[in-house]
Image: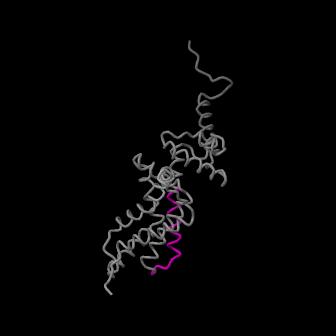
Amino acid sequence: MVKPYSSPRGKSRNAPATARKKTAESGKAKARPRKAPSGDAEKRILEAARKEFIAKGLDGARMQAVAASAGVNKALLHYYFRSKEKLYARVLEEILGAVWGELAGEFRARSPEAGLEPMLRTVVSTYVRTLAANPEFPLFVFRELSGGGERLREGLPELIRRFQEVPATMARVLREETEAGNILPIAPVHFFMNLMGMTVGTFLIMPVIRKLGPAYGISIDFDEAFMEERIQSITGTFLNGIRIRRAV
């Protein structure tokens, strides 16, 4: 005769399942949102990540190399940023936010009735000065674009939402100046592309000049004085191209 099952030591047959459930619930209860790294550690991590991603791209970059360069433990790096892809997205967000955040701040500080020339100088000087302080930014973005720009497309809508007054102000000023007969008609997209070509392009060509210039007797100090000259040159060239000249 087969004896009915009786659990050892009086425990219920459902005990293992109950224990697993309690363990899972206990694990959930203990879970906590991951804290952001300290300001200094975060800065070191993001700087190290920028250099690693610029040098090797997303696929070739290694979290161990980022951790070593930043002087942090690899496990800590994964704890804060979880994956290489999330760290990459954070670096891209920081780069675009730095430029557009600075630009948005300048736009808020200026008079809305200032007109085209002050607006243009604001845009050019903000881009030039921000990129002069962070010359690796354009290289990082171009690396992203050369890889298809998937993460840039994902983050761009949020960026535009946060700083929408920048493109909106540019489009408004262009429309008003065109309607007033002060400038030739130009689509906002062409205005922006031309502007990016002269500002961002500056920092893409600088390494070429540094490398090849001495062979042709060209030696340039890309210092603050040069950047001010560059701002004046871009602003003047742009205005001369679209401003309507009236006969005296």
The reply to whether residue 26 is visible in this rendering is: no
Q: Is residue 112 magenta?
A: yes
Q: Residue furthest front?
A: 217
Residue drawn where x is 40% and y is 60% of the image:
197
In which quadrant of the rendered image does the C terminus lie?
bottom left
- Tell me where residue 163 appears, x and y as whole percent: 47, 66
- Tell me where residue 49 appears, x and y as whole percent: 56, 47
Indicate whether 84 appears above or below 97.
above
Residue drawn where x is 51% and y is 55% of the image:
137
Indicate whether 81 appears above or below 175.
above
- Tell me where residue 244 appears, x and y as whole percent: 33, 78
Q: Is residue 145 magenta?
A: no
Q: Residue furthest bottom?
A: 248
In the picture, residue 186 is in which quadrant? Answer: bottom left
Q: How is the protein colored in the picture? A: one colour
- Tell me where residue 226 appears, x and y as whole percent: 53, 65
How many numbered discs, if any?
A: 0
Q: Residue furthest right?
A: 9
Indicate whether 245 appears above or below 13.
below
Q: Main secondary structure of the magenta part?
A: helix
Which region of the structure is painted magenta?
94-113
In which quadrant of the rendered image does the N terminus lie?
top right
In the picture, residue 237 is in which quadrant? Answer: bottom left
